[in-house]
Amino acid sequence: MRIARFAFGGEVRYGVVDSPGRESADDELQVAELAGHPFGAADSIRFTGARYPVADVRLLAPVLPSKVVAIGKNYAAHAREMGGEPPAEPVLFLKPSTSVSGPVDAIVRPTHLSKRVDYEGELAVVIGRVCRDVPAERAAESIFGYTCANDVTARDLQASDGQWTRAKGFDTFCPLGPWIETELDPADLALTTTVNGEVRQQSRTSLLLHHVPELVSYVTAVMTLLPGDVLLTGTPDGVGQLERGDQVSVTIEGIGTLSNRVVDSG
């Protein structure tokens, strides 16, 4: 099930994205509106009966997390392209909730502070329940679903600051979307990042050094995760610079494509 958060008629709503005539590849995607918030008990989710063509609504970030917990250097090839060896344990950092943006929002380069802003396509895990000290073998019970993410990074600030908060924390530096896929096995999914249609990153989640169940367990040993919190699982090799006017897209098998235009501040 694909859960979307969208704006229509001046209101923010949630819905399930589907195609009414599944046998026809030409059917236009629609969103069936949900009553209330989707993070309740499964048997409490109900539909209002309203349906809208996806083309007629504005897709928003599919979730507004209390925090975004991200994992650094979780693909061996990316760790090496950044000049280091793969870490023995997951490397944690946080992105503020205000960095989250949606699938049609612009990525804003803070040109008054940074001269190099990079893309980093990633699989994102959306947490579905309050969880703490979760064993890896029970991690799936705490996961609501998965979406595409771009861990946008001011690379020059990351190098000069010696830590990552400013480089990763600007507004618009965490695009998420286009929706949350709730029925997905994350173990081996194709991930592709393109800039202006040119492939820049191409990998599979099977190459993650630390896989989703291990990451959920590792993070929840440190902090409590709340419904709607987001866990970014790391980016593969091929990261690179974004320029004004670029269209950067992250596609993950079984989910869809997150695509954002790049603009400059000011």
Image (cartoon, helix red, strand yellow):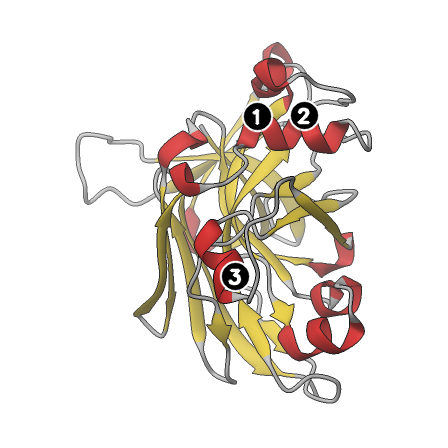
Name the image quarter holding residue 100. Answer: bottom right
Using a 10 Å C-alpha cutoff, classify the residue at mark 2 as few (fewer than 14 neighbours), some (14 to 19) or many (20 or more): some
| Pointer 2 residue | 217
The answer to whether the residue labelled 1 contacts the one labelled 2, judged by CB atoms less than 8 Å apart, is yes
Residue topped by disc 1: 213
**Whether residue 137 is visible:** yes
Residue 196: x %, y % from top left: 35, 75
Q: Amino acid at mark 2?
A: Ser
The answer to whether 62 appears left or right of 23 in the picture is right
Report the disc number at residue 233: none
* Residue sitting nearer the eye, 198 or 42: 198
Q: Residue at x 75, y 22 (%)?
A: 131
Q: Is residue 141 visible?
A: no
- Identify which amino acid the numbered label 3 is placed on: Glu
- From this view, report whether residue 21 is shown above or below residue 86: above
Residue 198, x across and y down, in percent: 30, 71
Against 162, residue 191 (above or below) is above
Residue type (three-letter) at the residue carrying disc 1 = Pro
Instruction: Determine whether the residue tagged by mark 2 lies in a helix, strand or loop.
Output: helix
Check disc 3 and report the residue beneath it. Answer: 120
